[in-house]
Image (tube, rainbow, N blue to C red):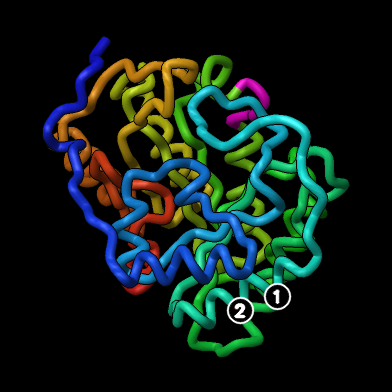
Amino acid sequence: MHTRKPEWLRRKIQGSHVSSEVYNIIDELSLNTVCKEANCPNKMECFNRSTATFMILGKVCTRNCTFCNVTKGEPETVDHEEPRKVAAAVEKLKLKHAVITSVTRDDLQDGGAGHFAEVVKEIQKLTQAITVEVLIPDFDGDEAALEKVIAAKPEIINHNIETVPELYTKVRPMANYERSLALLKTVKAKDSTILTKSGIMLGLGESEAAVINVMKDLRSVGCDIITIGQYLAPSSKHHPVIEYVHPDIFEKYKNIGMELGFKNVVSAPLVRSSYHADEVLADN
């Protein structure tokens, strides 16, 4: 097991007046970002580009994934003003592409799907020039809930597979691989104009063959875009990093993904689901 990060995972990004402005706007509107809650390694780079991934429905998750840094426990009360606040932040940050995600809220009847839809609608009121990407949980397989998000017509619906099915019991014990694939398939079946996207992490103990099989499974349900990045354990209490995967292997997976027919494959050690998401959309 590797304990020291290799050079390709080391970043030196300093703050700036731009990143300070992003922090101020987020704090002023009492919003959460996955950048901060998940301790993303690209946080300062994205803030310096005046981008952020908004995390709605509180910052406490009802699931117990062993890879994630987001707080687990008793979920917070839903802020019904949040859709308006997110739209206000999008406007103040002058975003052209807004990314919205959430904690998983198994305690809510629709898993928070209706709240997602309201956020999308509020952003769409600003201008047609802003595109919207939602990174959603599985809504516990509730198709009616998913349809609320589809009906709001974001440009991209993203749902992460996260890892290979063989590791789900260790990494995502409350999730279901087939259920996640079915979600992505349903989006395409209900509205083929919406781009679908998913992401996986490497270094959790998966085999190369298993990664390629996941990519094939995603293509079989019409997934358009895939992101592939290195897993970094948030603490010693989380799932350990089994391997630091060399950048050449990420490039190999990118080439395989393009051969399989993905419209876009973003594959590198520091890639995360929302990394340069605006550029990914521009390419499609």
Query: Marks 1 and 2, Cα distance to the nearest angstrom?
Result: 6 Å
Question: Please, what is the three-letter code of the amino acid marked with disc 1?
Answer: Arg
Quadrant (top left, top right, bottom left, bottom right) of the N terminus: top left
Region of the chain picked out in magenta, as a range: 173-177
Secondary structure of the residue carrying tag 1 is: helix
Q: Is residue 124 visible?
A: yes
Residue drawn at 64 percent across, 58 percent down: 189
User: Is 75 drawn above or below residue 33 in the view shown?
Assistant: above
Image point (34%, 74%), residue name:
282
Q: Amino acid at mark 2?
A: Ala
Q: Which disc, if any, is residue 200?
A: none
Q: Is residue 23 left or right of residue 64?
A: left
Label 1–label 2 contact, CB within 8 A: yes
In the image shown, does 185 or 19 lie closer to the viewer? 19
Q: Where is residue 206 drawn, in percent x and y? A: 36, 20
Disc 2 crowd, CA 10 A, few/some/many (<14, 14-19, 20+)? some
Q: Position of residue 85 (x, y in %)?
A: 66, 72
Q: Quadrant of the C terminus?
A: bottom left
Q: Which is nearer the eye, 183 or 124?
A: 124
Is 216 on the left-hand or right-hand side of 129? left
List x then y, in percent, for residue 223: 48, 52
Q: Is residue 105 left or right of residue 184?
A: right
- Residue at image location 76% in from the left, 40% down from the top: 75
**Could you say which quadrant of the image residue 128 lies in?**
bottom right
| Residue at 60% over, 87% down | 126
Report the disc number at residue 88. 2
| Helix, strand or loop at mark 2 | helix
User: In the figure, residue 157 lies in which quadrant?
Assistant: bottom right
Q: Decide: few, some or many residues near mark 1? Use Cα within 10 Å; few <14, some 14-19, many ≥20.
A: some
- Which dot marks residue 84? 1
Outermost residue toward the right in this view: 109
